[in-house]
Image: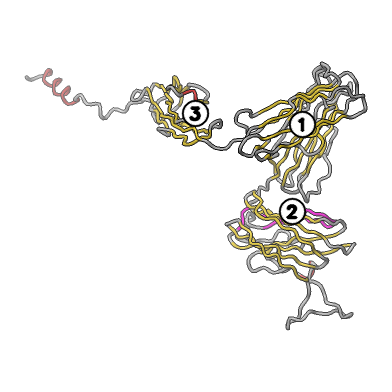
Amino acid sequence: MTGPLALTAVLLAGCGTSDTNITHVDPHLVVLPESVDFGDVTVGYSGAAEVTLLNVGLAPLEVSSLKLSGEQASAFHLDIGGPGTLDPDDSIVATVTFTPDTYLAYAATLDIASDDPDAPAVSVPLTGVGAYAPTPEIVIDPLALDFGTVAAGSTSVKVLNVSNEGRASLTLGAVTQHGSGAFSILGEDPGGFSIPPGQSQQIVWQYSPTASTGDNGTFVIPSDDPDEPELTVTLLGNGGGDFEYPEAVIDCPGTVAPRELVTLDGRASTDPQGRSLDYQWTLDGIPAGSAVSDIVDDGESVAQITTDIAGEYTIGLVVTNPDGVSSAKRVCKLEAVPKEQLHVELSWDLGHSDLDLHLLADGGSFFKKPLDCNYCNQIPDWGVPIVTDDDPSLDLDNTVGYGPENINIDVPADGTYTILVHYFDTSTDETANATVRVYSQGLLVAEATRAMDLDMIWEVGAVNWPAGTVGMIDAYYDNLQYDADGNPVLDEDGHTQQGPYECSSL
């Protein structure tokens, strides 16, 4: 065969029939992990795991369905936004929850359908075991507190019993009250209470009506009881009435930092008739050693508070409508957590006195620059020169009593940091009880208290970095001047000389 026909045949033969050099633009689904084993999960509680769907192909992937299958699928729950399209390199995460209701081994399958041409159907095996473990059991008596008839301006008291009939400690969550503000708790907020097995906690309520038309409300108590995670107590007085009460609502930040100006927003509070409200913010709790005493703009819808030390601050809000009817108090708990990696706090219990906090770097000595951070040397350059993250900072220096004072380092250099407290001055010449708290990575790692007299030095302990641990020293000695032979220096009257502790002596 010759000529054009033969040439055509040769060219066709050269093309061959293989497609190995052709790039296919297809989606490709990868599911991680390929199986999920929840292990032992206590009956009545839940375990959760994440399953990631990733498109590693070159074209969009259409996920058409995700579902659970198998005879025991009811013990599992799937939480995801639903089927959808994944662009190349995009992913979605499905959360699978396992909640066993009996002591058995469970198995089910997470089935995923997509337009992946190579694997249009993928199954992820799910396994878990219902295990025995002691659990709490909450019992509330009574579930309705009826105060009966109480004259306006008078007060009646009743007791609510919260018992734990389980075999593990019961922990109460953040409680909330709704309805009339004529009902209130006497004593500490029960949120966070831990009740051992077989024991109970009393919550004392008082009813102080302002009118005889009747009041009602509810009190919601969450807990870690697996069967009854939330119970509601009904509050009734003077027949209960049928009035709808204003509702106080706080946009509560939750976690903040020490020395932070925190905004408290109550503008979401409501009145059933949509009328204007009066606001009353209260400071109901502060950490030990805090000097915070008030809330700025406590009569406005938006108020502010400045945290001074780490710990929990409790804020309350009551709103009142034009008829003088008040809401139940809503509570906001602010947890002030230091943002610096090393945070040292000092407070004391004596007014008109001045105690000073010192932090010494490796090789430092009392009142000697630059390795003693104190009120005379507030931001020394430690660690890498010019870099500020590894430098200490005395952010508060209180000279009139109680404190607090604190020294912080954002990113401490490796080494040992010694904590000292000096009783510098007082107008009463009384003993002061000083308390030092040390936070590492936002966690309280050490706390100590010591009675101190004027001119004494307390060597509290040494912070070991990067471990973030504290070795307690607890040495206590006079701040005396000594000569070259180690003898105390005497003044012209023959008294031992204190110091040095003036900034000019540095």
Q: Secondary structure at mark 1?
A: strand
Mark 2: amino acid: Asp
Visible in this render: residue 246?
A: no
Query: Dot 1, how many residues are within 10 Å of its Cα: few (below 14), some (14-19), or many (20+)?
Result: some
Instruction: Please state which of the two labelled residues, at mark 3 or mark 2, is closer to the viewer.
Output: 3
Residue 249, by quadrant, is top right
Q: Magenta stretch?
A: 392-412
Q: Nearer the viewer, residue 39 or 297?
A: 39
Query: Dot 2, how many residues are within 10 Å of its Cα: few (below 14), some (14-19), or many (20+)?
Result: some
Q: Nearer the viewer, residue 277 or 154?
A: 154
Q: Which residue lies at the image location 78% right of the left edge and 51% below the top edge?
A: 289
| Quadrant where the image shows the N terminus | top left
Sooner in the amino-acid sequence: mark 1 or mark 2 = 1
Q: Residue furthest bottom?
A: 485
Residue denoted by label 2: 395
Residue denoted by label 1: 160
The image position of residue 313, as x and y in percent, is 75, 42
The image position of residue 140, as x and y in percent, is 71, 29
Mark 3: amino acid: Ala
Residue denoted by label 3: 94
Q: Secondary structure at mark 2?
A: strand
